[in-house]
Amino acid sequence: MNIYKFSPVLALFPLLILFSGTIISAESGAEMIQDPGFVDGEESRYVIRSGDEIRYSRTVINRISREDRRYYEITSFDETGERTLVVTPRNLMPLETRAVNRIGDSEYSTTTLVSSHPRLASDQVFVIGLEDLQVILRGYPFTNPQSLKLKILGQNGEDTGFSLTVEYRREERLELPAGTFTAHKLEVVTRLPGAMSIFRGAIPKNYLWFNSEAPHQLLKAEGAGGFGSGETQVSELVDYQN
């Protein structure tokens, strides 16, 4: 939310990858993520706190059809814009993102199209941008927790050079505005390459909590408020309808 301010996870990761009218070609590969059983029309609402600032966002998931094929379309909104992610229903592989950002009287948009799925190692997960994690990690193998490496493509279709992994931490009980839940806690760990590793102590910790019950909706997210921000940002579920 540091850039678009419409996704409860977006601002937790300063290394946001954006594309504009990009088409990425790749090959099919491993499948570590599985459909948790999204409900058509489900809606989640979040309160986001960062310092003295409070704002709200909502995320809606719909099933759509294109050329007789079915997909999930996930759209996040807040007062400054919206972002839509389209994924395959079987393994939540990203196919497309569309974003609209409004600043004052100005409006601009970005689009990413993925022409085919990337080839992944057995422990890799593909995302277009880190903001996709709020959706894709709902399909994490919670019954068999393991470390997963994130594969993120840069603007020119090249690897970013940063190592990002998803690590399972523990099961926790959460008291949230939406109620009391048992949650799986994940951490997104950033490792810097080469000489940049000396700055690893400055990298903020980023955590995601997902409902232990399917379809594992995002319950809470906590981390940095964005690049250069000293504020910790916390997003919490306010309401969930299916």
Image (cartoon, helix red, strand yellow):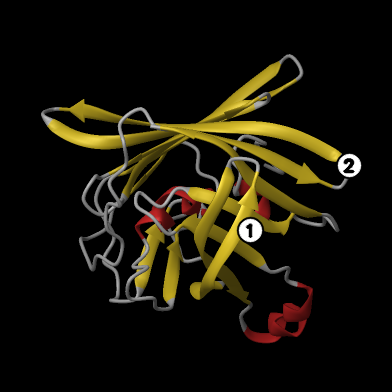
Q: Quadrant of the N terminus?
A: top right
- The residue under the point 42% across, 58% down is 137
| 151 up-or-down from 55: above or below | below
In the rendered image, the residue lying farthest to the right is 52
> How many C-alpha atoms fall within 10 Å of the one at disc 2: few (<14), some, or many (≥20)?
few
Q: Nearer the viewer, residue 159 or 204?
A: 204
Image quadrant of residue 70?
A: top left
The three-letter amino acid code for the residue at tag 2 is: Asp
On screen, residue 90 versus residue 234, left or right, reads left
Q: Which of 79 and 145 is in front in this view?
A: 145
User: Disc 1 on helix, strand or loop?
Assistant: loop
> How many C-alpha atoms fall within 10 Å of the one at disc 1: few (<14), some, or many (≥20)?
some
Q: Earlier in the sequence, mark 2 or mark 1?
A: 1
Residue 103 visible in rendering: yes
- The residue under the point 43% across, 48% down is 135
- The residue under the point 64% across, 85% down is 194
Q: Nearer the viewer, residue 82 or 8?
A: 8
Please give the count of numbered marks on the rendered protein. Answer: 2
Image location of residue 134, percent across then percent down: 49, 50
Image quadrant of residue 231?
A: bottom right
Residue 225 visible in rendering: no
On screen, residue 145 versus residue 10, left or right, reads left
Residue that carries the numbered disc 1 in the rendered image: 15
Badge nearest the viewer, 2 or 1? 2
In the rendered image, the residue lying farthest to the front is 180
**Tag 2 near tag 1, CB within 8 Å:** no
User: Disc 2 on helix, strand or loop?
Assistant: loop
- The residue under the point 64% across, 46% down is 236
Image location of residue 16, percent across then percent down: 60, 52
Residue that carries the numbered disc 2 in the rendered image: 52
The three-letter amino acid code for the residue at tag 1 is: Leu
Give the CA distance from mark 2 to mark 1: 24 Å
